[in-house]
Image: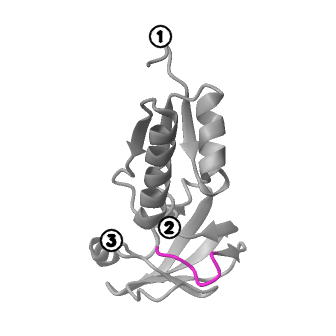
Amino acid sequence: MRRQRNAKIIATLGPASSSAETIQALFEAGADVFRFNFSHGSHADHKARYDIVREVERKLGRPIAILADLQGPKLRIGPFAEGRIMLKAGDEFVLDRDETPGTLQRVCLPHPELLAVIARGQSLLLDDGKLRLQVLASDGQQIRPRVIVGRALSDRKG
């Protein structure tokens, strides 16, 4: 049985809305489609949510649509050991290829093509332009910028 309306209501699922009870309540309240934002969370997280949506679908006997919002070509940094750090104006920081979780001093930039072309004096914008860096040095293996406009920086920001 499908709902008879021209508009669809899309609900984005995340950590706060991943239980079967919550998903069922959202569907019963009118959500037609559940969106998975692949820019955040792991594939395992999304698979678990997918399985729960399909479980609710079987329980209610009604089709439930899923929308996979895939991350685009945005370049992203790696994760931090603590999930996020605070960078203040004047701080120096390193972007490198070391895949270990980042610290207050450094984080992985898993894009060797960028490490090869970024030069001293260039500006870098992270977190959709909210964090501004000025490159002090770059040797093809790492970039050492100074923070111009600081803020919190968390895992996998682009």
State the residue position of label 2: 156
Please give left or right for residue 79 compared with residue 68 in the image. Answer: right
At label 1, the amino acid type is Asn
Mark 1 to mark 3 CA distance (whole Å):
45 Å
Relative horizontal placement of residue 15, taking residue 62 as reference (left or right): right
Q: Is residue 80 covered in magenta?
A: yes
| Amino acid identity at mark 2 | Arg
Tell me the colour scheme of the image.
one colour
Residue 44 position, x and y percent, is 43, 66
Q: Position of residue 62 (x, y in %)?
A: 45, 29
Q: Are marks 1 and 3 in contact (CB under 8 Å)?
A: no
- Residue 84 appears in the figure: yes
Residue 152 percent across, percent down from the top left: 69, 68
Task: Inspect the image, locate mark 3, and give the three-letter code of the amino acid beneath it.
Answer: Leu
- The numbered mark at residue 114 is 3
Q: Foreground residue, 63 or 44?
A: 63
The image shows residue 118 at horizontal and vertical percentages of: 36, 72
Q: Secondary structure at mark 1?
A: loop
Considering only order in the chain, which callout, 3 or 1, is on the residue closer to the N terminus? 1
Query: Foreground mark, 1 or 3?
Result: 1
The numbered mark, 3 or 2, whose residue comes first in the sequence reads: 3
Instruction: Please tell me whether mark 3 sits on a helix, a strand or a loop.
Output: helix
Looking at the image, tell me whether mark 1 or mark 2 is earlier in sequence order.
1
Q: Which residues are magenta?
A: 78-83
Give SS at disc 2. loop
Residue density around tag 3, few if under 14, some if 14–19, many if 20 or more, within 10 Å: some
Residue displayed at 62% across by 29% down: 28
- Is 156 inside the magenta-drawn segment? no
| Residue positioned 41% across, 44% down in the render | 69
- 52, 109: nearer the viewer: 52
| Real-space CA distance between mark 3 and mark 2, rounded to the nearest whole angstrom | 16 Å
